[in-house]
Image (tube, rainbow, N blue to C red):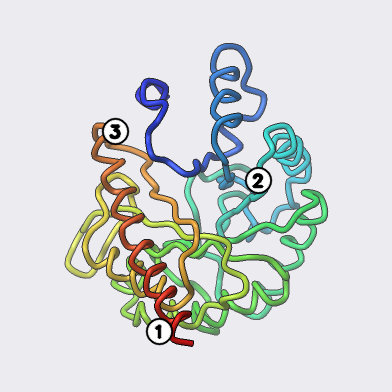
Amino acid sequence: MGPLQDAAHAPIDFFEVAPENWINVGGKLGRTFRSFTERYPFVCHGLSLSLGSPAPLDETLLHKIRRFLDDHGIRLYSEHLAFCSDDGHLYDLMPIPFTEEAVHWVAARIRRAQDILGRRMAIENPSYYAAPGREMSEIEFTCAVLAEADCDLLLDVNNVYVNSINHRYDAVQFIRAMPRERIAYFHVAGHYHEAPDLIVDSHAATVIDPVWQLLDLTYAEFGVRPTLLERDGNFPPLAELIAEVEQIRAIQRRHAADEGRHALRA
C-alpha cells in the first residue's frame, strides 16, 4: 500500500480486496487498511468459498466475511463460479461441470451464503481450461445458476475474452447473453499467451486492445457500470496503473455522452 499511501489524491473511485487476506489482520497493517476503507468505497472478491465444492459450505468463513463487510461498511461481496477445495484447499480455481445437477448444487449453496451474509452476492464468470462432464454451454450454465440462486453477476470481460480463445466461442455472443438486470460490476485485466490457441489469465500484464474493445461493446450493451482493473502481480509504477484506470474512464465518458445524446433525442 506504500505507493497508494503516498498518492492520497490518486484518481481511484473504489478498491477491491480479497477478504481472506484481511480478516483478523490487526496492528499497523490493520490500521492502514482501515484508513483506506474510511476514505474509499471498497468491494470484496472472495478466493476460497469454493462454491462448486462437494465438501460442506464453509459457513464459519461466511460468518467471518459478514463481520468483515459490516465492520468496514462494504456493501458488495463476490465469489468465483468455481471450486478450490474438497478435503483441503487446492490453491487454484477448478471448473464446475456444466450440468443441470451442478446448477442445483451451486445455486443452493449461493442462496445459503446470501442468507448468512445478509446481503446479495455476485458470482464471477471464471476463466477455465477444461470443461469436464459438459452437458450445456457456459452461457446456459451461468444464466441458469444466476436465475436459480437469485444472485448478481460480476462480469469479467477479460475472462470472456480468454475463454473465447481457449474454447473457441464468440465473446460478443457471450456478453450479449448475460442478464442485464443482474450485473453488479465489471472486471478487466491482463493475461499472457502460452500458445496461439491458449491464453492464461494472469492479472499480471497490461490490458490488451481486444479486451478494451470488448469492454467498449459491453458498455454499449449494458450501459456504464463500475469497472475494476485487476492486477495481482508484476506491478508497474503506480502511474502506469492509473493510466489504465483513466482508459476505463475515457471509455465510460464516451458512452455516458452517447447516452445523454440519445436521451435528448428521445
Contact, mark 1 vs mark 3 (Cβ under 8 Å): no
Which residue: 63% across, 17% down?
26
Quadrant in the picture for the N terminus: top left
In the picture of the structure, the residue carrying the numbered disc 2 is 87
Q: Tag 1: residue type?
A: Gln
* First of labels 2, 1 by sequence position: 2
Which residue: 57% across, 68% down?
183
Of residue 119 and residue 255, the one placed in the foreground of this image is 255
Callout 2 secondary element: loop
Which residue: 67% across, 33% down?
72
Of residue 104 and residue 211, the one placed in the foreground of this image is 211
| Picture quadrant of residue 234 | top left
In the picture of the structure, the residue carrying the numbered disc 1 is 173
Callout 3 secondary element: helix
Callout 1 secondary element: helix
Question: Viewer-nearest of labels 1 and 3?
Answer: 3
Label annotation for residue 238 = 3
Going by the picture, which residue comes out furthest to the top? 27
Q: Tag 2: residue type?
A: Asp
Q: How many other residues sit within 10 Å of disc 2, few (<14), some (14-19) or many (≥20)?
A: few
